[in-house]
Each structure stands twice: as C-alpha cells, then as structure tokens.
Amino acid sequence: MEESSEPDLDRIDLNILRILQAEGRLSNAELAMRVNVSAATCHRRTQRLFEEGYITGVRAEVAPAAVGLGALVMVGVVLDRSTPDSFAAFEKAVLAIKDVLDCNLVAGDFDYLLKIRVRDMVDFNKLHGQTLIALPGVRQTRTFFVMKEVKENARLAF
Amino acid sequence: MEESSEPDLDRIDLNILRILQAEGRLSNAELAMRVNVSAATCHRRTQRLFEEGYITGVRAEVAPAAVGLGALVMVGVVLDRSTPDSFAAFEKAVLAIKDVLDCNLVAGDFDYLLKIRVRDMVDFNKLHGQTLIALPGVRQTRTFFVMKEVKENARLAF
DNA sequence: TCTAAAAATGGAAGAATCTTCCGAGCCTGA
DNA sequence: TCAGGCTCGGAAGATTCTTCCATTTTTAGA
C-alpha cells in the first residue's frame, strides 16, 4: 500500500511546502490557519520538513540591482578533455568563484553551463579574460548576455 | 553628494542583507546581535529593506527531488522572426508554463535560454513535444540535459 | 470484526519574541 | 552656537512560539 512517488508527504505537508516556498517568513499561527490545522500540529509538521531535508533552507531574495549586480550572463564551457580529473578540477575551481551562481554539467554542445552575475559588461569582460578562460582545462567558452530576464527563479510546481 | 553605486545602504544594511540571504528565518533578536545593533534598530532596518524593495521576498527552498522534480534541463530556443510581437507572444506563453523556472532573452546563438524542472526524461519529452515546440514562433530548440548540478542558485556576493 | 498499541491531533500555558513608543544622542546647516 | 531633523537603544504591552498532556484517529493483528 505504498504510494508511488512521494512517500511520506500528505496533502497538508505539500501545502506547507507550497506556502513557505512563496512566503518563507510567514508566522506559524498564520500558516496553521491556511493549511487548516492547529498551531501545534503545524509547528510539528514544519519542523519535520526542515529536519528531514524537504526544506533545505530559507533565504531572503536580494534584488541584484540593489547590490550592484545588474548584469546577468550565461556561459557555455567546453573542456579540453573529458576525463574525470579534468571535470573535477574544473568544478572545484568554479565553486570558488562567487560570481558564478549556477554551474551544471550538461549533455550537448557544451560541457558546462554557467550562470553569472556581475556589475556590468566591463566587469564581465574582466572576469572572462582573467578568470573564466584561465580555469583548468577550458578549451572554449560561449557567452550569452542576458538582455531581459523574463522569468527568474520561479517556484517549483508540485 | 550622491554616492556612485549603492546609494543608501550602509555596512549594517549590507550585513543584514547578507545574513538574511543565507538564513531568512533568523529571529530579529539574533540578527540584531550579529550586526551589532539593538533589536529595535535592527527591526527598523530590516523593515525598510523590505519596504524599499532591497529584499523582494523570503522563500523556503524545497528539495526538488523530494517533490518529484528530479530532472533539470536547459533549453536554447530560436524563434522564427525577431519582431517585438514575436518575442512578446513567446514570453507570455512561457510565463504560463510552471515547469519553466528561468527564461532569459539572450544575445548569441539562441533567442532564449530556459531552465526547466520536471520529474524525469519521460516528462521532459512530453513537455518538449507537446508544449515547447508548440510555443508561438519557435523555429528550433536545443536541449541540454543536466547530468550533475555542481552549483545551484548560489547566494549573491556583494 | 474487534481490540489494543501506536501515532497524530488540538488546547493550554509558560517562555520567548515582536513591535512600538519615548527620550537621548548625534550630525547638519544656518 | 544652536535649532532641526534623524537615528539610536531601552522598555513594555501585544503577539507568537514551543512544549506538555489528554483525546482522537489510525494501524495492525487476532
């Protein structure tokens, strides 16, 4: 009688996740009302969702432009060789670059796709010329300047 | 006497932003201690950061795999024509697709780059065949399956 | 079907936190 | 120098959190 996909999350848990995903600072009392359980139960449920890793953290979203990070750039990276060592070295180096928000190993024309936030194009050119192309094993990069952010970091639909 | 870049954020405000970006559920009392001001001042500062749009929201991060969204896919999209109407129609349609987390208009080989989360490759194939290539004005798409998420949604460095 | 153990629930209350008011300190400009 | 505006921290009522406990609901076996 095991459920097929999401083992131990019932409708209430899923609603808590959905609501906190949108409003992470909601008070427990208000959250309890919205999901139709008592404050005590809601508190226990939410605590469990944190403890068991369904919620990995709660973060305030800072407006990038407000802190001088107005430029968003996507970069495709191709490495020289496709060896495990080569990948590992590249990944370790990328993790240390604060401007890189996302880094994904992909199948397709690139080895990695990066998402980068910097102040402006001048800053990106410096990052590109001094850091990115100097990363271990990089054969070539392809840059995609973002001209308009249509949708950014949307909530998960479940 | 206008400052060049970040007008009205002093060191304390920036620290509040940095801390809340990492721990959005921190109590005001604890936050006040960390930034070395009284609870009252910290409360006022934080409130202002919300009201003036420096913090756009606070969100719980839900583990994608826990809610059945284990697959991450990047898709490059090229449109038939590069007219404003064409772009507008595409963007409007994309905003309605819940699986699309990011959508950016870029300069380069593609018109748009999408970031999509679905359950698995089967789900992606369905989404691709039934929805993506049927979006208004789409000439071609290029799919990049993510094989490893090296860095995901990192915090802004400022 | 029935029963007993196990688990989850909601109410209540002490503890902790929030939120606002107020007076004091500190620049700023005349 | 001094008046005005701004920001600060302490304090206290209001709100919220967190836990305990009795009750209800669910589960599993006979």
Image (cartoon, coloured by chain):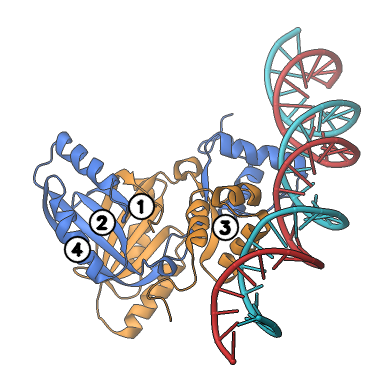
Chain colours: A blue, B orange, C red, D cyan
User: Between marks 4 and 1, how big is the CA–CA gap?
Assistant: 37 Å
User: Between marks 4 and 3, how big is the CA–CA gap?
Assistant: 36 Å
Q: Which mark is residue A22?
A: 3
Given residues B39 and A79, the one toward you in this image is B39
Q: Mark 4, residues whose alpha carbon is within 10 Å: few (<14), some, or many (≥20)?
A: few
Q: Are marks 4 and 1 in contact (CB under 8 Å)?
A: no
On screen, A136 above or below A156?
Answer: above
Residues behind callouts 1 and 2 on a single chain: yes
Residue A30: in sight, yes or no?
no
A157 sits to left or right of B48: left
Image point 27% across, 67% down: which residue? B77
Tell me the amino acid under the disc marked 4: Lys
Residue labelled with disc 4: A126
Q: Are marks 1 and 2 in contact (CB under 8 Å)?
A: yes
Q: Nearer the observer, disc 3 or disc 1?
A: 3
Chain ID at mark 1: B
On screen, A121 above or below A83?
Answer: below
Give coordinates of residue B93: x percent, y percent: 42, 72
Tell me the amino acid under the disc marked 3: Ala
Q: Nearer the observer, disc 2 or disc 3?
A: 3
Residue labelled with disc 1: B124
Given residues C24 and B54, the one toward you in this image is C24
Q: Which mark is residue A83?
A: none
Q: Nearer the observer, disc 4 or disc 1?
A: 4
User: Between marks 3 and 1, how big is the CA–CA gap?
Assistant: 25 Å
Residues behind callouts 4 and 3 on a single chain: yes
Q: Secondary structure at mark 4?
A: helix
Residue A102: in sight, yes or no?
yes
Q: Mark 3, residues whose alpha carbon is within 10 Å: few (<14), some, or many (≥20)?
A: some
